[in-house]
Image (cartoon, rainbow, N blue to C red):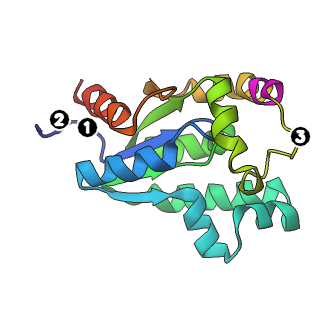
Amino acid sequence: MNEIGENMKSNIVLIGFMGTGKSAVGSRLAQQLKKQFVDMDREIENVTGMSIPEIFKRYGELRFRSEEKLMARKLSERENMVIATGGGFVLLEENIEALRAKGVLICLDASPEEIFNRVSRKKGSRPLLKKGTTLEDIQALLQERELSYACADIRINTSGRELDQVIREIIEALRY
């Protein structure tokens, strides 16, 4: 595999709705590119000593978004990473600006149906999804966040695709 262009920013920041594959893609992409992988949600859990659902339950979304903002600032100082953000990371412009300084933003997309199927298996660990979440709820949230996801430098659809296909497409897109 050829080296990726030297003018490329040091970090790769994966954004997108929950269930689009940011953690799975990020982990494998980091291995292939020999970069450090950071899952922001896991980092927040390590720092706070609480799971994301626990933070939401005890302190609410505002506290979580505050932790997310602090983590974005902290990670913006580092280089040579693949960073998987949480689905709502893009809701705060300050987060985007912090990680864009040293990173290229790649939005992973998936169809509402694919997202519904993927997140239905993990509803307990998805604080913004309630037990009765429907496909329509996911479609509405996706529509609500679309403008925020539009900040991406590159967009990749993960629906019905193997991890390796998605990673190859990202690497090709980064070569510009």
What type is the residue that disc 2 sits on? Gly
**Circle on res. 24:** none
Name the residue furthest bottom.
49
Q: Earlier in the sequence, mark 3 or mark 1?
A: 1
**Circle on res. 8:** 1
Say whether residue 136 is magenta: yes
Q: Residue at x 44, y 26 (%)?
A: 156
| CA neighbours of label 1 inside 10 A, class few (<14), some (14 to 19), many (20+) | some
Q: Position of residue 117 (x, y in %)?
A: 67, 35
| CA neighbours of label 3 inside 10 A, class few (<14), some (14 to 19), many (20+) | few
SS at circle 2 = loop
What type is the residue that disc 3 sits on? Gly
- How many discs mark residues in the rendered view? 3
Q: Which residue is mark 3?
A: 132
Give the quadrant of residue 31. Answer: bottom left
Q: Position of residue 133 (x, y in %)?
A: 84, 37
State whether residue 74 is above or below residue 133.
below
Say whether residue 37 is magenta: no
Distance CA(mark 3)–CA(mark 1): 43 Å
Quadrant that contains the N terminus: top left
State whether residue 111 is above or below residue 11.
above
Q: Residue at x 32, y 28 (%)?
A: 169
Q: Earlier in the sequence, mark 2 or mark 3?
A: 2
State whether residue 175 is above or below residue 62.
above
State whether residue 118 is above or below residue 44.
above
Quadrant that contains the C terminus: top left
Q: Which residue is mark 2?
A: 5
Magenta segment boundaries in residue numbering: 135-139
Marks 3/1 in contact by CB < 8 Å: the verdict is no
Give the quadrant of residue 150. Answer: top right
Horizontal side of 113 relative to 33 (left or right) equals: right
| CA neighbours of label 2 inside 10 A, class few (<14), some (14 to 19), many (20+) | few
